[in-house]
Image (cartoon, rainbow, N blue to C red):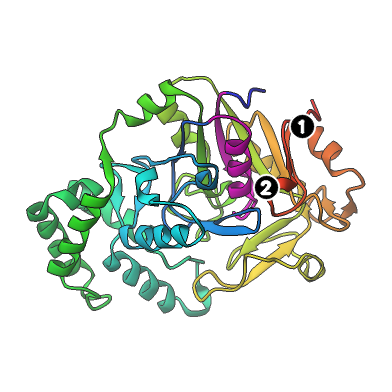
Amino acid sequence: MNLDGHVVVVGLGFGDEGKGAVVDALCAARPTTAVIRFNGGAQAAHNVVVDGRHHTFSQFGAGTFAGVPTHLSRFMLVEPFALATEARQLEAVGIRDPLALLSVDDRALLTTPFHIHANRAREDARGDARHGSCGKGIGETVRYSLRARTDAPTVADCARPAVLTRKLDALARFYDPLTPPPHSVDELVSLYLDFADAVRFTDGGETGRLTDRGRVVFEGAQGVLLDEHHGFHPHTTWSTTTPHNARELLDGRPHTVLGVVRTYHTRHGAGPFPTEDSAVLARHPERHNGTGRYQGAWRAGHLDATLLDYAIAACDGVDALAVTHLDADRPRVVLEHGSPAVELDDPLAWFGARRPVALAGYGPDRADYRTPVTIGV
């Protein structure tokens, strides 16, 4: 396993595995040219703690505290207003001019207030049959793009006011029966022009240029168990959460796929959770995750060996594991559904028997992470 080269970081659960802390640790440990986001959008919530500073990374890469620039690939769903808010938050914790650390593939889809309001209206209408959502417009952005094709707004359109006006007018008309327009099209066009002036847009060759220049960390969002193809519908995301997109961007370049997993499973909101146990939730209080209106309740349960193996298989395999929350008290594992949970006396050895463990996390701070770790097959 080679953590000196390109690394693809994916979550092997339902999300919230600790991908942000892992990306930060990788970037702090070795020179890194860029962090490239390869799926999802503003619904990501990757927590990083360094020397008392905390930030929940959403669209900026989790290598930002380590001084590593972020590139949002064509597979990202870009939400400019959330980006501007996140930039201000980063400035407040000491990052100078965060937008200067950002580049965006101009082919990426644009998430607008129309998508966000429609997403929330649709989820509210489901009542007790909610699918689970972050309320950030992700599903609606993809849904509309599948219908509108080339008429769906993209990042490139932010610098083309006539094209953007036409596309936003069509978008507003499409969603008007579901939810009233939250903003005027003219207002949005003006604000998106400001976004185009503030952020560097790139063509499709930027990923290749970055990966040829030096080591790149590809940061995944959500977890494989929420994948649009491999998750358990309808409680899934409209995004490919396996390494597939990153592998496509790498275009055959050598890389290491690092799967991130906690010592216990968690889930935010609605959906199946075979090993859920309220005692696990009580034993492991969560500092940076809670209940949200659209996400729903924070849930926890025993490590599920069946789901872990399934997630690894859905990735077409991973090269190594990053195991987080090794400071958890008395973790247990369910080896087969229907069997009782058994104690993990030596969690690293248990994980290492499945895949080599390359990184180990014993707490929320960067100082709590160890790499390289040489455990396992």
Assign the C terminus to one quadrant of the image: top right
Horizontal and vertical percent position of residue 37: 44, 42
Tell whether 67 sits left or right of 141.
Answer: right
Measured as percent of width and height from the top left, residue 298 is found at 64, 68
Q: What is the CA distance from the residue labelled 2 to the residue labelled 1?
A: 15 Å
Q: Secondary structure at mark 1?
A: loop
- Is 246 above or below relative to 16? above
Image side of residue 330 versus residue 106, left or right: right
In which quadrant will I find the N terminus? top right
Q: Residue at x 25, y 48 (%)?
A: 155
Instruction: Specify whether residue 154 is painted magenta.
Output: no
> In this view of the protein, can residue 321 be seen by the observer?
yes
Residue at numbered disc 1: 373
Q: Secondary structure at mark 2?
A: helix
Q: Is residue 322 left or right of residue 338?
A: left
Extreme left residue here? 162
- How many numbered markers are drawn? 2
* Amino acid tagged 1: Val
Crowd around label 1: few <14 · some 14–19 · many ≥20 (10 Å): some
Amino acid type, label 2: Arg
Magenta stretch, residue numbers: 5-31
Q: Disc 2 designates what residue?
A: 366
Name the spot of residue 85 as percent of width and height, x first: 39, 63
Res 45 visible:
no
Q: Are marks 2 and 1 in contact (CB under 8 Å)?
A: no
Which residue corresponds to the image point at 38% horizontal and 72% vertical from the top-left? 122
